[in-house]
Image: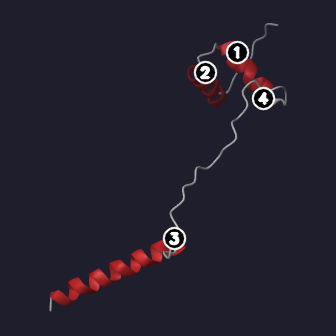
Amino acid sequence: MRTTVTLDPDVEKLIRDAMKERAISFKEALNEGARIGLGGKQHMRARKFAQKTFRMGEGQEFRWDKALAIADAIEDEELSRKLSLRK
C-alpha cells in the first residue's frame, strides 16, 4: 500500500539512524518501527544481559564497599603530612 505520511523531524532522524545502523532501506526501517511500536512481531530480539564476574581469591579482608571512604582517609592523611611539612 502506498500512502503519504508527514513525519516529525525527530521521527525521521530515528528512521535514518536505524537505516544506517542496520543497513536497511527507508521502507524497511519505517515498517519495522511501526510493527514494534504498535505491538506487532519484533524482528530483532534483544540479547539477555549477563554480567561477567571474576573471583578475587580466597580470604579477601578488604571491604570493597568502603573503598571510597578508605581513599578519602588516605588523601586526608597525605594532606595533613604535606601541611605539617610547611611549618
Other residues around mark 1 within 10 Å, as few (<14) / some (14–19) / many (≥20): some
Mark 4 and mark 1 residues within 8 Å of each other at the beta carbon = no
In this view, 72 is above or below 30? below
Sequence-wise, the earlier of marks 1 and 2 is 2
How far across and how far down the image is residue 47, in percent?
69, 36
Mark 4 sits on what residue? 36
Residue 82: horizontal and vertical position, in percent? Answer: 21, 83
The residue depicted at 70 percent of the width and 15 percent of the height is: 28
Direction bottom: furthest residue: 87
Q: Nearer the viewer, mark 4 or mark 3?
A: 3
Query: Is label 2 in a helix, a strand or a loop?
Result: helix
Estimate the spatial distance between the alpha carbons at disc 4 and disc 2, rounded to whole Å.
15 Å
Would residue 78 appear left or right of 40 to someone viewing this image? left
> Which badge, 4 or 3, is on the more N-terminal residue?
4
Q: Quick one: which residue is furthest to the front in this view?
A: 58
**Residue ID for mark 1:** 28
As drawn, the label of residue 22 is 2
| Marks 4/1: CA–CA distance | 12 Å
What residue is shown with label 3?
A: 64
Q: Amino acid at mark 1?
A: Glu
The amino acid beneath tag 3 is Trp
- The amino acid pointed to by label 2 is Arg
Q: Which one is closest to the eye, mark 1 or mark 2?
A: 2
Task: Determine whether label 1 and label 2 are within 8 Å by CB.
Answer: yes
Dot placed on the residue nearer the N-terminal end, 4 or 2? 2
Q: Which of disc 1 and disc 4 is earlier in sequence?
A: 1
- Residue occupying image coordinates x 73% and y 31%: 45
Counting residues from the start of the chain, the first of labels 3 and 1 encountered is 1
When the figure is inspected, residue 8 is found, relative to residue 67, above or below; the finding is: above
Q: Give residue 1's mark.
A: none
Question: Distance between the Cα atoms at labels 1 and 2?
Answer: 10 Å
